[in-house]
Amino acid sequence: MSRRRAIRAAGLGAALLVPALLGAAALVSRSGAPGGAAPSGGARGQAAPSAGDAPDPAAPAAPPPPLEVEFAGCGAVLAGPACALPDDRAIRLWIKAPEGARVAVEAGATPVPLDGAPIQGGLLVRVPVPDGAAAVSVTAERNGGRAVVRLPLLPPLAEPALTQAEALRRQGRLDEAASALGGLASGQDPTLKALAIGKLARVDLARGRIPEAIARFEASIRAHRAAGRLSDEFLDRFALAYTLLYNGRRFAEARAALDPLAPLEASHPEGRALKPYYAALLSFESGDLRAALRQLDASAAAAERLGLRDHRRHVLQKRAEGLQVLGRPIEAQALLREVEASLPAGSPPCEQAALQNNLGWGALQVAWASASPAEALAGADAALEAALALYGGPCPRPAERANALTNLALAKLAAGQTARARALLDEARRTDASADPGVAMYWLDIEGRLALGSGDAAGALRRYDRLARLAEASALAEGRYRAALGRGQALEALGQPDRALVAYEAAEALRGELSLLAPLGEGRGAFLGRLEEGARRAVDLLLERDPGRALEAARRSRALALAALRWVDRIASLDGEARARWEAALSAYRRERAALDEEGRDDWRLSSDELEAARAARSARGRSIRARFDEALLLVRRGEPAATAPAEALRLDEGELMLAFHPIREGWAGFAVTRDGVAARRLPALDPAAPAATLAARLLGPFEAPLRAAGRLRVSAYGELERIDVHALPWDGAPLVARMPVVYGLDLPGGAARGAGAARGALVVADPQRDLPAARREADAVAAALEGRGRAVERLSGGLATHAAVASALEQPGIALFHYAGHGFFGGVDGWDSGLPLAGGGQLAVSDILALRRAPAQVVLSGCDTARTGAAPGARGLGLGLAQAFLVAGAGSVIAATRPVDDALAERMMVALVAAGQDDPGAQLREATLAALRATPSSDWASFRALVP
């Protein structure tokens, strides 16, 4: 058995209908209901009794059942709130009531069938409204309690002149639209006047008259507020924020345009939910990728809940951009193809154009990440040409057209078509001379690369100096990185290697700074890989000039992925307020994690459908809890240089050799490090799946002399090389581990592991799921051997090994050794979803390990995939898995498996491990490995590794 880019949603001209954030409710029938169409009746939203149905005054009123109702599809939402019906007189309701409640919906006096789609624990119902209906009501009854929510209705706004003017605007007939709207804006009807002013602002935007558009939006917003038209105020505030953001990057003003909506959100669920999308645009542009992804996910879930397919497509396109930024272009492109497949025939030309531009940009990202980019570049060309055809015809938007031209120029540059790239760049400049800095950034980058390609290094340096100034002034983090990298390349071409190194080191420091923007669980390793060129070039440039400095650059690059996680060593440097905030965040995490796992103890009582729903809900909550822990980690990194060298000089024992590897411009740099110095070699490109003999010749052969003199080997692998079992490579006719102990070092920054001190206790956790008999025997043997040496052992087996018990025991000061025998699993993009299953449906997750206030000095994880890390293409630096998490938390060593392991083999090796009676983890595992080799040479004895900080 095995232990095994931004788009303008709906053009900002139509009502953009988005539901409330997940977990919030527009209409909630319970005490403290957040505004909205108020429940009819008295306290806690209980329905008022009708005449002739008075309750017995002596009997206590039965409490109303909780009832949540959200509405969507109104033509407009007015203060109250009240729903002005759309032209088709149908709205949508999302209704959530408790199990067993009888729910009824009426439009006026007409019952509405509850035949909608089940979504997120509720029901999405389409409600056709008959003529004469004054309200829609939803009633829920259970156990004698009754809850009612009521939404007043208003007739559709019928104004043919306004409709005609809007049609002209959408057709690009701006002069005719402005003339028609001008008449309405000077009229006496306050509603039509406010709407006409807002649409005139959009005409100004299309003409490129940004100051005039801003002034008109501000006027329309005041008019909507005075008229009580909530939905139109929301829409014009969103348009104003978008305009401020993408025309001058006026972040504070854009945020100020959104903030006044907060007190109105409860009365307008669609606006309340649309707001996070625009907040996400602001977060993206200001560099807060973590917040942007969280906001987009909330908006996508809400869009699904209320059936808002158009908006969900906009959110998913922005989510795809986030994946591109994170270095996950293939996933991003798959998401964009999903959006394309769901786009209805006859969709607005501008929506089609935006999607084609996004598809083209996505294909370009795939090409940049591919060793064979021709197919992806052809796809980019096709999509971008389609976008340009639309922007040059039915969707005349100069700024967007310039964006697509820029993307196509980048594609042609990647294909080596420099003359065509130059022509497209010139056309983009003519199309939109005052482009957003985010586009102008790429103009300068293209010019710089063209200059380098033509041998004009001095001209390239001037372009990249200009790019650096633009990026600094516009808060463009990636622009700063591109400028530093481009300056380094130009300086190298000018024969100034020392200045080039300074530039590359600046790029690497920016990579470290930017790494904090990539949330764990979303692809931090791939994000770092996307920005790896500076490190590659620095190591390459130093390799022959100064191997020692080259090694330092490689170590610094390699450690970035885990540097942000080592919080324990930084707590002492926090001021009082920051430390209190961290401790509060950590305590909240622990409470929520414990409660989450406790909920799973009664899963056995649920039906299969209920169990699936409960697990899905807990999984979503678990991701949310872990995301908050990741955010809390930022508290201990604020103000710290993100790309410093490891805090301590490399310490090696007598006779110890370290082999370290890092990618360079072509192939790899290999380093052999001893107490006496550093030797460096250039190595060819490597395929981790190559035969073992080939890998040994390329990785070990160049370092034969130091290997023969060594008594212990420490391997510092990188990226895809982490997958290679160096200890199992052939050496002198036998596996390398037969020659010497081999450990795998993380070379963590931020201090050495904290030793066990006087602690000698051990915690042994055995088979929490009670389905691995060999794991139970293993635990018995390990505990007996430890007790025989006078060590105190705490055992948690089977049902006793709960999350609460294990997490508490791990932090006890007397525990120096943690031995886990049971299942393990690897999950998530960064390994963030990996865990050790525990009793009662719980698990010890990566985030739980990182949250430990102390970790045992020695850890043995005898389970599947416990040392596995992400092996996705493009993932760089140090991967994160369960074993690595223990080392980051402070453990001195971890013995764990990089893949699934057989129950019996794990027992045999772990019994031999403890019988070896050695303190050095490498020597321990060597003895156990050799024993397994002798007994069962065909077994997967190489799956276990010894890892050290």
Image (cartoon, rainbow, N blue to C red):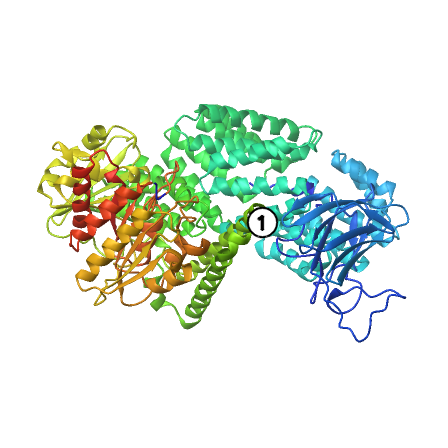
Judged from the image, the secondary structure of the residue bearing numbered disc 1 is: helix
Give residue 560's position: percent from left, percent from top.
34, 49
Q: Is residue 287 visible?
A: no
Place of residue 115 in the rendered image (x, y in percent of width and height, measured from the top left): 74, 43
Say if residue 133 shows up in the picture: yes
Q: Residue furthest bottom?
A: 58
**Relative horizontal placement of residue 106, taking residue 852 as reference (left or right):** right
- Taking the spot 75% from the left edge, 72% from the top edge, the residue there is 60
Residue sitting nearer the eye, 19 or 113: 113
Between 741 and 238, the one nearer to me in the picture = 741
How many numbered discs sit on the rendered protein? 1
Identify the residue position indicated by label 1 in the image.
610
Residue type at tag 1: Glu
Question: Could you tell me residue 316's position as x and y percent?
Answer: 58, 41
* 907 relative position to 248: left or right: left
Look at the picture and state if 854 lies above or below 321.
below
Q: Residues within 10 Å of mark 1 (few under 14, many from 20)?
A: few
Near-viewer residue (523 or 379):
523
Q: Quadrant of the N terminus?
A: top left
| Front-most of residues 784 and 738 | 784
Position of residue 530 relative to residue 69, above or below, is: above
Q: Position of residue 436 (x, y in %)?
A: 57, 43
